[in-house]
Image: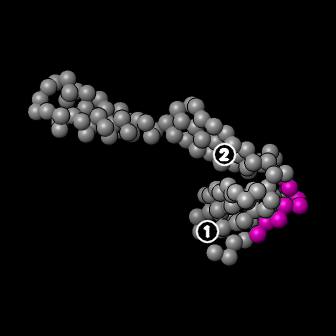
């Protein structure tokens, strides 16, 4: 809403005329940036399919899936606010942070969906 308000106020200042570009350009830039960013959404989940990462921008986006069979191991990075996970795959790695999810919950999901998958805790 703030972005729309700033954008509308910038257009009002532009159309009303006035003292020059300094009076409306900041409103247009900041308002446009707010509206642009408002359409961004990112979701990460662990499911029976594997690790799913969805990045959506105003209804369009991409979905990346790392299946349980492709995972070599899970490296857990627990913190007070959640658990970070590194998914090493063929020399590369995917990483994710699961806010509010404990280390044990990640271990349980791995044991349920891929019983033979090694799960370790990082010493960092």
Asked whether, in this view, residue 32 is left or right of residue 48, the answer is left
Q: Is residue 10 above or below residue 108?
A: above
Residue 117 locus on image (x, y percent): 84, 61
Looking at the image, residue 16 lies above or below residue 123:
above
Which residue is depicted at the point 46% across and 38% down? 38
Whether residue 54 appears in this view of the structure is yes
Q: Is residue 38 left or right of residue 124?
A: left
Residue wearing tag 2? 53
Q: Is residue 34 left or right of residue 123?
A: left
Q: Position of residue 65 (x, y in %)?
A: 73, 44
Nearer to the camera, 80 or 95:
95
Using the numbered discs, state the Cα–Cα distance from disc 1 to disc 2 in whole angstroms.
Answer: 21 Å
**Badge nearest the viewer, 1 or 2:** 2
User: What residue is disc 1 on?
Assistant: 79
Quadrant hosting residue 99? bottom right
Q: Quadrant of the C terminus?
A: bottom right
* Residue 33: x %, y % from top left: 38, 39
Q: Earlier in the sequence, mark 1 or mark 2?
A: 2
> Residue shown at 45%/40% (left/top)?
37
Q: Quadrant of residue 18?
A: top left
Q: Residue furthest top?
A: 15
The N terminus, quarter of image: top left
Q: Residue furthest front?
A: 91
> Hey, which residue is sitting farthest bottom in the picture?
123
Magenta-drawn segment: 112-120
Residue at screen point 66% across, 45% down: 53
Check disc 2 and report its element: helix, strand or loop. strand
Above or below residue 47? Residue 4 is above
Q: Secondary structure at mark 1?
A: strand
- Image x and y of residue 8, in percent: 29, 29
* In the image, farthest residue toward the left: 19
* Residue 109 shows in the view: no
């Amino acid at each position: 809403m703030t972005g729309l308000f700033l954008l509308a106020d910038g257009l009002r200042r532009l159309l009303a005329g006035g003292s020059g570009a300094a009076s409306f350009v900041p409103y247009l830039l900041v308002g446009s940036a707010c509206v642009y960013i408002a359409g961004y959404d990112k979701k990460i989940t662990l499911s029976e399919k594997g690790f799913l990462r969805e990045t959506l921008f105003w209804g369009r986006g991409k979905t990346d899936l790392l299946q349980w069979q492709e995972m070599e191991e899970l490296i857990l990075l627990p913190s007070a606010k959640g658990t970070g996970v590194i998914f090493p795959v063929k020399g590369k790695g995917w990483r994710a942070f699961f806010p509010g999810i404990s280390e044990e919950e990640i271990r349980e999901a791995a044991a349920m969906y891929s019983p033979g998958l090694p799960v370790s805790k990082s010493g960092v």
